[in-house]
Image (cartoon, coloured by chain):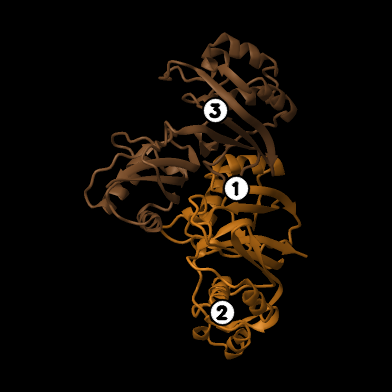
Chain colours: A orange, B brown
Amino acid sequence: MLRNIKLTIAYEGSSFHGWQIQPNAATVQEILKTSIETITGGEKINLVGAGRTDAGVHALGQVANFKTGKPLTETKWKNALNAMLPPQIVIQRVEFVPDSFHSRYSAKDKTYSYHIGFERSPFLVKREWRLGYPLKLAAMKRALLFLKGKHDFSSFASSASESESKICHIKKCEIKQSGSSLVITLSADRFLTYMVRNIVGTLVKVGAGKIKPKEILTILEMKDRSKAGPTAPPDGLYLVKVNYL
Amino acid sequence: MLRNIKLTIAYEGSSFHGWQIQPNAATVQEILKTSIETITGGEKINLVGAGRTDAGVHALGQVANFKTGKPLTETKWKNALNAMLPPQIVIQRVEFVPDSFHSRYSAKDKTYSYHIGFERSPFLVKREWRLGYPLKLAAMKRALLFLKGKHDFSSFASSASESESKICHIKKCEIKQSGSSLVITLSADRFLTYMVRNIVGTLVKVGAGKIKPKEILTILEMKDRSKAGPTAPPDGLYLVKVNYL
């Protein structure tokens, strides 16, 4: 009998070339799959992630699942994996889930946060986007409101984005001051490639006074990537949570 | 005319072999000295640190000073150095100080903190001592009180410690819960080699129930390193602040 196992995973992304397995690069999915297969003792598994994260992007609560015949308890899986994984990847939770659970298809929405810092800190290297100029928070808040709801996000999608429909539903969005940093949080049913980073790059232009908040509406309507701001660096991006029904 | 310049420095210690210059190893003092001499354009400087930090130890507010004839403003020094240094070393403040200021001899006291964590986090790798078992905070607090004041700390000094007198005055000490971590903070007029790490190693034994709080008093009185607990790893140690008169 195969068990379906759900993993909740945190990782510091700066050492990895993102989540997704690719040739000749250390990725979280590959390192994790190899560790699981060491435990299953040769039984090949199919490790499905809730979504890709780009190179350098961090995760506080990535989710993945796999099926295996190996009869270990949830706690034993967790301890064995954490003992084997590099310390930059941590299994936070292991849960046995119904056979129908699929980490990507079953996901209801995802939450990302993006951290922007204004002061040099040796402890936040590759963990935030450090800017050398201040941003107007009020303008950014106004701009963000135009993105809330269901829209065609073509203007904020990578030109290489594979999905046909560019319609996403942003259910929650906020910007908060956290110490000397700004944290932008977005929850949506789906995100297009580079979407959060493109939104952040555009919001920073708003905060710097280069784009007016209500121009966001025009940018959305034009469905043209070249109208929005640049792609923010991966360093400040965190996959916070994947929610399931 | 030579100017005496005081630097306040933060660094993430895991990439460096400590503060002090040594052959064939990247140290903070050496990297900083080289950067300063690139700016002075060949004028050799003597960079004096408030104290050494061991390999892997972090600093939130290390202090150093040097004298130079280079006529730059405080802000220009700060910007030039930060532009040149690796991002794991940050100059927080540059101040012109009286000629008599000496970062080590003028120091009145120093504050260190030590972070102990109980949950795996990919973001705290090499930044705390992660323990796999819980500690009794109340017992540790009682033990810590016996260390407060002026004592001979031979039992907590490295056997290789160079200073003749082992008498130190611990002026402030506390243990606080911070999230899921414990933070131990100590302020003293001076610290012996490995003293904080040896105190922490001993306090952890108290927290684990292996040493009774009041045994700390006996350990102090015996002036024998072998009676105290092991040396805690450098990862959790932070030089927080150097205070001057």
Asked if residue A1 is positioned above or below residue A186 in the image, the reply reads: above
The image quarter containing residue B84 is: bottom left
For label 2, the SS is helix
Residue under pointer 2:
A156
Q: How far is mark 3 from mark 1, CA to CA? A: 29 Å
Residue B70 sits above or below residue A113 on the image: above
Q: CA distance from mark 2 to mark 1?
A: 31 Å
- The chain to which mark 3 is attached is B
- Answer with mark 2 or mark 1, whichever residue precedes in sequence: 1
Q: Amino acid at mark 3?
A: Val
Q: Is residue A47 visible?
A: no
Residue B32 is situated, as x and y percent measured from the top left of the image, at 35, 46
**Which residue is disc 3 drawn over?**
B196
| Horizontal relation, residue B193 to residue A78: left or right | left
Image coordinates of residue A24 in percent, x first then y, are 40, 58
Viewer-proximal residue, B109 or A23? B109
Identified at 49% across, 66% down, the residue is: A233
Q: Which mark is residue A90?
A: 1
Q: Is disc 3 placed on a helix, strand or loop?
A: helix
**3 vs 1, front mark:** 3
**Residue A17 visible, this orientation:** yes
